[in-house]
Image (cartoon, grey):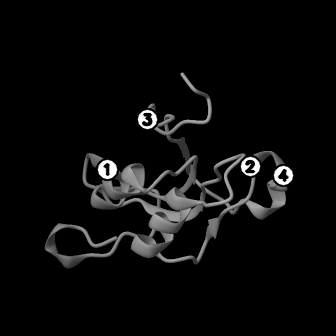
């Protein structure tokens, strides 16, 4: 992450005299939808290292396809999260999960 003045952050905390500033880290994104959380996180310096989007009971995976078209397939999983081994999820500092899209959710709420 590039900090004001062009310095590069390489740790979770930066200290300058009596001031300390937290540095964003690595994020895993569950129920990623089309990537709304990711847009906000990346704009604030977080790095999304893994994402998952799966639409049960749907042959077409439109949300996942849209996500991949915007962010690429590297680190993206289009598998039922209940079937993803924990060992497949990389080290991360923050875990986020999207809310169901009421218009499209299979929860039919």
| Residue name at image x 32 percent, y 52 percent | 40
Nearer mark to the viewer, of 3 and 1? 3
User: Which residue occupies the extreme top position in the image?
Assistant: 109
SS state under label 2: helix
SS state under label 4: helix
Q: Position of residue 13 (x, y in %)?
A: 41, 55
The number of callouts visible is: 4
Q: Earlier in the sequence, mark 3 or mark 2?
A: 2
Distance from disc 4 to disc 3, alpha carbons, whole Å, reads 25 Å
- Can you identify the residue that label 4 sits on? 83
Distance from disc 2 to disc 1, alpha carbons, whole Å, reads 34 Å
Distance from disc 4 to disc 2, alpha carbons, whole Å, reads 5 Å
Looking at the rendered structure, which numbered label has been put on residue 81? Answer: 2
- Can you identify the residue that label 3 sits on? 103
**18 left or right of 109 in image:** left
Which of the image's four quarters has the N terminus?
bottom left
């Amino acid at each position: 992450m590039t900090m004001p003045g062009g310095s590069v952050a390489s740790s979770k905390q930066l200290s300058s005299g009596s001031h300390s500033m937290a540095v964003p880290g690595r994020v895993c994104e569950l129920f990623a939808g089309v990537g709304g959380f990711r847009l906000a996180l990346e704009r604030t310096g977080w790095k999304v290292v893994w994402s998952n989007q799966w639409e049960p009971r749907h042959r077409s995976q439109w949300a996942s396809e849209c996500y991949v078209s915007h962010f690429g397939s590297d680190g993206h999983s289009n598998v039922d999260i209940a079937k993803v081994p924990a060992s497949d999820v990389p080290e991360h500092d923050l875990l986020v999960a999207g809310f169901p899209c009421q218009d499209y959710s299979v929860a039919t709420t």
